[in-house]
Image: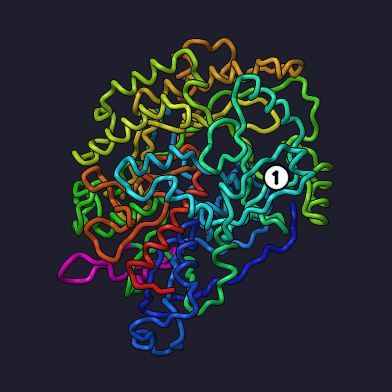
Amino acid sequence: MVTFAAAGVSAIHITAPLNQTYDYIIVGGGTSGLTVANRLTENGKRKSKPPISNYYPHMPTNLTDTVLVIEYGNLVNDPSILVPANTLSFAPTPERYFNFTPVPNPGLNNDTTSPLAAAIVGGSSAVNGMFFDRGSEADYDAWEALGNKGWGFKDLLPYFKKSVTFTPPNEEVAERYNYTWDVDAAYGGHGEIQVLFPPYQFPGQNRLWDAWREIGVEKPKEAAAGDAIGSIMAPSALDPVLRTRSYARTAHYEPYAKRENYHLLTGYQATEVLFKEGGELEAEGVNMVKVGGADKSVVRARKEVIVAAGAIWTPWLLQRSGVGPKSVLEGAGIVVKKHLPGVGANFQDHPFGGSVWNWTTNPYFPTAGALATNQTFYAEAEKEYIQSRAGPLTTSRGNQAAFLSLKTVDPEGWQALVDAVAAQDPTSYLPAQYDKTLMAGAKAIHNITAEYLARDDAAAFEFTFAEGPIGNAAIMRPLSRGTVNINPTDPASGPLVDWRTFSNPLDIKFAVQMVRFSRRFNTLSSFAGLGAVEVSPGTNVTSDAAIERYLRSTMDPTFVHMAGTASMLPEELGGVVGTDLKVYGVGKLSVVDASIVPYLPATHLCTTVYAIAEKAADAIKVRTGWDD
């Protein structure tokens, strides 16, 4: 294991906020929270209006707007977070995640797989696989089609660009691994998140690229420019000099931690949004407790409370504060401040799983697995990484994936599946707590899904691949919807996460096609001589019913792409926030994380969350009088 020291600074460790009042309080120090905090504290010219001394008499009067970030987790200085190759292990490090058990999932034989919700400064950007891709143009245009004007691909592209700095590889590396890019179309910004293609890939991958070409799947020159369909090579969130993980902490906190107006409070949990008494409903602060403790502290926000707690904890906080479905709140004995049925609804993720394959004759060495099994190889790789920041340890969990249309995966039966989706009334498969607005929103999303499943520019599946045969995939357009609610018997405990995977019976039909496609793909002539063998479910499992039984016992409900639980939709479609990301009917309260995503894009979510945060920060500045 690499043992070089991790860069970092200490948070402001205090038992109560430095101030009783801040201009902005951000709940959550993860991907979106730290991005927004950086943007709201980056102006060094403007004085607060009215004078800051009226609110914080012990502080200098030349400060800009003040921001407090409240984060449940800690600043974890484990250097393994920074080493790209350490993401190749899927075994979670418990101290980096929340620990709770979801509602048993009937669609997966009552599975209780826990969502890997990060409990660490930097959030999911600190623990993900560093796969830095974007969805297709169609993915984000769907958001606009659902009533979110200004949130289509052309509107988000400037924020995708703003959030990152892309460093092209040198000519030798680009030629060796067939890296292609288009800076003008996809990048060109100077954001804090560093993005580049790693200088190393494991051998054997050419067989996979040959196979994609054999089956007619093309590699776009630049998937990040809105053409994320086909077999893609994505860059990593990787520092171009240190070759370490670039994430929200290293990009949006550490370089700015000495700003006097930027306070990060770790080891505390916001438990309730506080509202002013009398008049219109308006947020004025939060209650919080030290993790493991019970004593409450109150901190107030002069301008806005910004929730960035993620798709699992954001609905929990809103519901505990009295904002959410009336039936859920009353069942937990919480006074209803604002009836918003969409809080905790429209819960989405990409179910992940499929078949397992091996090559019995593998002429390629090393493989990624050798890092875990061959001590000599690891020692050599570690030495190369420490000395020159090159070699196998610069490679993260993945850079390659095939985003495929339904037509590609099921060329003979795709139309029948599309027709089945188009003909289906989804309402009988939705959660019982759904009211007429949520039903209307679900139908609108369902109709878009039927349309997108028939298109060539919108992926229905993601097949991850590297230097071995393919097997696992993720369903990009699941019809099933879950919920995230407070526990009615103990609202202070962790949320009740109900995945409801395969609750819509058509989803399992799509999963079956993933297994059938892998059988066709792994026996292509491109793999001749490698002895591809299906380990599971096995060639004796042939009927749809038998494959379904296998998938229900092996699939994961999550690709760690949790989203949707405070959706950006019109209120009449069950929305929680509008296009300005302000919570409907509540003043000075907004949401800026993945919970606002109304319809999951066919991509990993990290880059999308950065773009959401950048766009949110601009909106907050405009409405709260933040000046350049």
Residue 271 locus on image (x, y percent): 34, 62
Above or below, comparing residue 121 to residue 48 in the picture: above
Above or below, comparing residue 159 to residue 426 in the picture: below
Disc 1, SS:
loop
Q: Quadrant of residue 599?
A: top left
Residue 2 locus on image (x, y percent): 75, 54
Q: Can residue 80 be seen in this view?
A: no
Q: Does the magenta stretch include residue 398?
A: no
In the foreground, 435 or 66: 66
In the foreground, 189 or 248: 189
Question: Callout 1: 10 Å neighbours few (<14), some, many (20+)?
Answer: many
How many numbered marks, from 0 up?
1
Q: How is the image coloured?
A: rainbow
Q: Quadrant of residue 504?
A: top left
Q: Does the magenta stretch include residue 290?
A: yes
Q: Is residue 529 left or right of residue 578?
A: right
Please give the range of residues in magenta: 272-298
Residue 291 locus on image (x, y percent): 44, 64
Residue under the image location 39 percent in, 19 percent down: 417
Residue that protrudes farthest toward the left in the picture: 279
Q: Is residue 453 visible?
A: yes
Q: Is residue 21 left or right of residue 77?
A: left
Q: Mark 1 points at which residue?
A: 395
Quarter of the image with the C terminus is bottom left
In the foreground, 487 or 612: 612
Three-letter amino acid code of the residue under disc 1: Thr
Residue under the image location 40 percent in, 31 percent down: 478
In the foreground, 412 or 17: 412
Q: Is residue 470 left or right of residue 20?
A: right
